[in-house]
């Protein structure tokens, strides 16, 4: 693992995955302050405050519009990468974050809730390329490091969530007057990525396959792989270039109709939809509300949340450093099973906490278990699987399918969870329990282990 390959992996993860994690969690703590701002602005404009229902609806839109922006971004990322390359696409998306930070940072000064919603949607547009982030380095990584590097984004998602939780503490940016600053902190990692990206060469496969620049691809490989002998890799890419020139890239519609990759496509659908419908977004978006319902004192909730964030980073590191030893399947199966059991545990703790006050601590432990289970496997393995289960001709369409489902389910959970919680109470977590256990069962029965296998070997296993 060379310094350049590790550095570009960290840089891309820092500017994409970390921002994704930050934007998932940053709306949790200042929810009360943002709702108060919405109410005050509405009262100034129309002479009356918003009712509880419309206020919940407006705030749910603020939370979930991030996912709609992500959906659009996931559909555009292929065009951007093809036209501008990896570095060009990353630079342009970083500029979007600077624009979004400006909208959210000045929203209160200008008395405009619309600017918060627009800023959230733009940050989602930037994060839409997350589903394809692992492909940037998986294609030039040795196969024994694909899992480690492929789970690197999940570590940065956890770090982004943790950063949002720490900055949301009352001693830092958790007070009412600081929530616009808290939302606009996203400009910092985006600016660093924009400044440092030019220090690294373009993706070797993009240079050779898209630009036919053999010299540029060779120089990039020398730097990324740290070896003077890269002729085998160059020949492999040339063979891929020739096969692609005689092979028509598969569209989404063709992918869905191609029976030869039916199980791969269904697997991408199941793991990406299950990743979001597992309830993890409900936990991250509404952690404070969940802890408040569990009976945790309001003054202790921010610090309890930070504690869960530290545990999720640790769990993510365990997944990252064990994936090449235990494989993809065990991590994702154990992760989903742990999340399902803990979701049921939250329901039980909420039902019994009136009679048994100590059950509130069981509820907190179950929330921690859901987050830890997610970060250990389901946070990163679905993205990795999307890259590994398909050959080059089918991979772009698979990214679109997986990314679109990922973001649609993210939006659905972010938007309906408050209403689901109001209508079903403690039983809402049983929905997530069922989803997690069914996904784990599907992976156990259908999806083979892909550790240390080439893309063609994986394709042959499914065949």
Image (tube, rainbow, N blue to C red):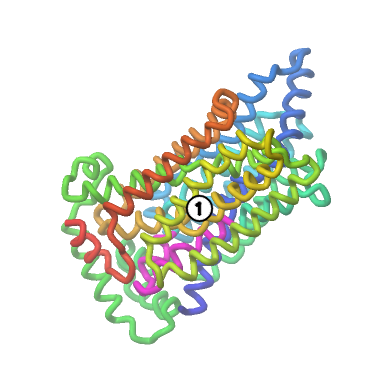
Task: Residue 153: say if magenta.
Answer: yes
The residue stretch that appears in magenta: 134-158
Which of the two residues, 226 or 174, is positioned nearer the viewer here? Answer: 174
Name the chief secondary structure element in magenta: helix
Task: Residue 215: say if magenta.
Answer: no
Residue beneath the point at 27% across and 64% down: 455
Q: Position of residue 157 (x, y in %)?
A: 56, 55
Residue 81, can we see it? Answer: yes
Q: Residue furthest bottom?
A: 228
Mark 1 secondary-structure assignment: helix
Q: Residue furthest top?
A: 47
**How many numbered discs, if any?**
1
Q: Quadrant of residue 133?
A: bottom left
Quadrant (top left/top right/bottom left/bottom right) for the C terminus: bottom left
Q: In the image, is residue 316 above or below residue 72?
A: below
Which of the two residues, 324 or 90, is positioned nearer the viewer here? Answer: 324
Residue beneath the point at 76% across and 31% down: 110
- Residue tagged 1: 374
Residue beneath the point at 35% across and 58% down: 387
Q: Position of residue 446 (x, y in %)?
A: 27, 52
Q: Position of residue 440 (x, y in %)?
A: 38, 50
Residue beneath the point at 57% across and 60% down: 14
Q: Is residue 323 left or right of residue 111?
A: left
Q: In the image, is residue 157 above or below residue 297?
A: below
Q: Is residue 68 left or right of residue 118?
A: left
């Amino acid at each position: 693992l060379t310094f350049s390959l590790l550095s570009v992996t960290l840089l891309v993860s820092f500017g994409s995955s970390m921002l994704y994690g930050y934007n998932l969690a940053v709306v949790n703590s200042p929810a009360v302050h943002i709702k108060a701002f919405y109410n005050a602005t509405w009262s100034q404009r129309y002479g009356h405050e918003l009712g509880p229902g419309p206020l919940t609806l407006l705030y749910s839109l603020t939370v979930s519009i991030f996912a709609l922006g992500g959906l659009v971004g996931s559909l555009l990322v292929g065009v951007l990468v093809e036209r501008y390359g990896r570095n060009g696409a990353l630079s342009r998306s970083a500029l979007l974050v600077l624009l979004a930070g400006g909208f959210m940072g000045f929203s209160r000064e200008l008395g405009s809730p619309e600017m918060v919603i627009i800023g959230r949607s733009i940050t989602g547009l930037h994060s839409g390329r997350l589903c394809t982030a692992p492909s940037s380095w998986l294609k030039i990584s040795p196969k024994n490091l694909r899992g480690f590097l492929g789970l690197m984004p999940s570590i940065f998602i956890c770090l982004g969530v943790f950063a949002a939780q720490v900055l949301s503490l009352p001693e830092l940016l958790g007070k009412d007057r600081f929530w616009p600053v808290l939302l606009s902190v996203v400009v910092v990692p985006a600016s660093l990525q924009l400044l440092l990206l030019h220090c690294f060469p373009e993706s070797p496969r993009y240079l050779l396959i898209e630009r036919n620049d053999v010299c540029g691809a060779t120089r990039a490989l020398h730097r990324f792989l740290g070896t003077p002998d890269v002729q085998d890799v160059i020949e492999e890419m040339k063979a891929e270039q020739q096969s692609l020139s005689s092979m028509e890239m598969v569209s989404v519609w063709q992918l869905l109709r191609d029976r030869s990759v039916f199980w791969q496509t269904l697997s991408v659908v199941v793991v990406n939809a299950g990743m979001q419908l597992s309830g993890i977004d409900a936990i991250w978006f509404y952690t404070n509300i969940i802890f408040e319902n569990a009976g945790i004192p309001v003054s202790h909730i921010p610090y309890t949340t930070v504690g869960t964030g530290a545990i999720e980073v640790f769990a993510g590191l365990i997944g990252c450093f064990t994936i090449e030893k235990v494989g993809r399947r065990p991590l994702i199966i154990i992760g989903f099973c742990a999340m399902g059991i803990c979701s049921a545990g939250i329901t039980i703790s909420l039902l019994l906490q009136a009679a048994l006050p100590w059950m509130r601590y069981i509820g907190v432990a179950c929330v921690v278990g859901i987050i830890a289970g997610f970060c250990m496997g389901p946070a990163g393995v679905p993205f990795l699987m999307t890259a590994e289960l398909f050959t080059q001709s089918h991979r772009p369409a698979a990214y679109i399918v997986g990314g679109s489902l990922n973001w649609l389910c993210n939006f659905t959970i972010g938007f309906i969870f408050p209403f689901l919680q109001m209508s079903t109470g403690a039983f809402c977590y049983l929905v997530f329990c069922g989803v997690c256990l069914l996904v784990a069962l599907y992976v156990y029965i259908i999806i083979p282990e892909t550790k240390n296998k080439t893309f063609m070997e994986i394709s042959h296993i499914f065949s």
